[in-house]
Image (cartoon, grey):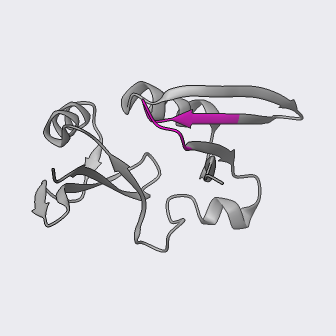
Amino acid sequence: MRLSAVSLLVRDYDEAIAFYVGVLGFDLSEDTDMGGGKRWVRVTPKGGETSILLARATTDAQRARLGDQAGGRVWLFLETDDLMRDHAAWLAAGVRFRETPRHESYGRVVVFEDLYGNGWDLIEPAH
């Protein structure tokens, strides 16, 4: 078995694609029209296997959770081979960081937010 995807609530498919693909550099793995305004949209980090399914929030309960899918905790963990490169590029592109990069026993890490405010760890593992 393997984890193939995790869903992420978004306000709008196209604005989410613009952020994940245009700003973070993920691949647009799939964008299929399901009819009735629903799409099956998956984005995948370059070189990654697990995709994020961009799920458009359609109810008040779902919209209330935009940006808070983990109750204020870091929601997802993204590994990189060069944290400082990605931090600089994303900072220049307007990505919001909650802190400056720091060293931990497992590597270099910095917390950033996606376009809705969900917290992510960007991690460069220790060698």
Left or right of 53, for residue 49: left
Residue 110 image point, x, y percent: 21, 55
- Please state the extent of the stretch shown in magenta in the rendering: 41-50
Residue 39 drawn above or below residue 115:
above
Give the overall secondary structure of the magenta segment.
loop
Left or right of 24, for residue 86: left
Residue lying farthest to the right in this orientation: 36
Along the line of sight, the residue nearer the viewer: 2 or 63: 2
Residue 106 drawn above or below residue 58:
below
Number of numbered discs = 0
Q: Quadrant of residue 102?
A: bottom left
Q: Quadrant of residue 52?
A: top right
Residue 57 drawn above or below residue 90:
below
Q: Residue at x 15, y 50 (%)?
A: 127
Residue 36 image point, x, y percent: 89, 35
Q: Residue at x 67, y 34 (%)?
A: 41
Residue 89 image point, x, y percent: 21, 30
Residue 125 drawn above or below residue 33:
below
Left or right of 37, for residue 3: left
Along the line of sight, the residue nearer the viewer: 59 or 73: 73
Determine if the magenta segment contains residue 42.
yes
Q: Residue at x 50, y 59 (%)?
A: 67
- Quadrant in the picture for the N terminus: bottom right
Along the line of sight, the residue nearer the viewer: 33 or 117: 33
